[in-house]
Amino acid sequence: MGTRLTITPPEDYDLARDVCSYGYFVLAPNHWDPDARSLTRPLELESGPATVVITQSGSGPSSKRQRAAALRAQFDRPLARPEQREARARIARMLRLDESAGHVRAFHAVDPRWKRSGRGRLFRSPTLFEDVVKTVTSCNVAWPSTVKMNERLCAVCGRRTPSGLRAFPRPERLARTRAGTLRGRCSVGYRDARLIELARRFARGEIPEPWLTDPATPDDEVFAFLKTLPGIGPYAAGNIMQLLGRYSRLAIDTETFRHARTVLGYDGSDAQLTKRVRAHYEPFGDHVFRSYWFELWDFYESKRGPASGWRREAIAKTFTAAQF
């Protein structure tokens, strides 16, 4: 039997709502089971990968509970004590367990539209490296291609867990991969050399993650640094900002313009729309991305139903990359 960990989440935490809050939850190696309401994925640990299945008893609208139920993390192999600490840290980052109920309430105070549903956390990856790669693979491409790229990256470059699943590639592995392999076998197209260079910088310790996540570091400095990375423009930098827990920037792309026209009722050129959108969300201060994103997510759910019931196969056929 593998190790089983019990994790105490913030008092308002709901696994189904808070996992199914951002499109990366349907990208490999993540697998959300709408029926079991569980998240399964391999985690890369220092001593080797392990598959974890995360569940929460009574997962549902948090307003029906006084306090969130504990999370259960079942692994497919025994974990030594250091691995358990590492796994807890990976899970905490992925599920944003570092964002307390008070932190979410501060968002609701600024934008009370989401108080009743409890929305506030956005799903992300266990590591910053995976978040950056997923951001690069979601730019300038249709969503089915984003899905395929991440599936192939795991299949070709990821290590296998005891239960047979492939983990997301480590930076060291991707840094050693030939550009032709990434282009030919992983379908990443023009991103091949950029992904390799990003992986090399992570592997060499050139990405100052503690500085990037330190609340004392100004958002402007983080944004400027991110734009110096290979393949990271203003949109990608804005998206990585929110994946770092910095919500003061919008990530503006063609989907933003669709939202501006069809939901906000704006018209004009892209430049005019950008100006109006920024002005529209400015009152939300340091929470502008969350207010913007949950408007988008609400629109998607109005078309397809609650995200916790979405299945990857159906999503890949009907959504574009920009819509996640």
Image: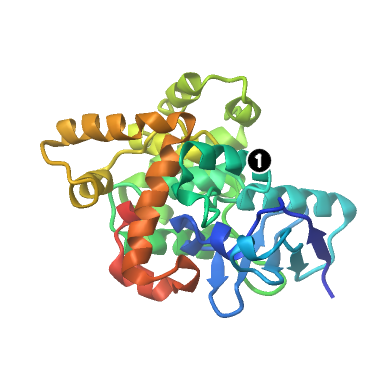
Above/below status of 254 relative to 61? above
Residue 13: percent from left, percent from top: 65, 56
Q: Which of 22 and 291 is in front in this view?
A: 291
Above/below status of 126 relative to 247? below
The quarter of the rendered structure image containing the C terminus is bottom left
The residue sitting at 42% across, 54% down in the picture is 182
Q: Is residue 292 visible?
A: yes
Residue 276: percent from left, percent from top: 22, 32
The residue sitting at 42% across, 35% down in the picture is 288
What SS does tag 1 mark? helix
Left or right of residue 310, residue 10 in this image: right
- Mark 1: give few (<14), some (14-19) or many (20+) Cα within 10 Å: few
Left or right of residue 203, residue 295 in this image: left
Q: Give the residue number, with chain letter if any, for mark 1.
A: 102
The residue sitting at 42% across, 33% down in the picture is 284
Residue 156: percent from left, percent from top: 51, 62
Which residue is the extreme one toward the bottom? 35
Q: Can residue 205 be seen in this view?
A: no
Task: Please state which amino acid type lies under the numbered disc 1.
Answer: Gly
The quarter of the rendered structure image containing the N terminus is bottom right
Please count the marks in the image.
1
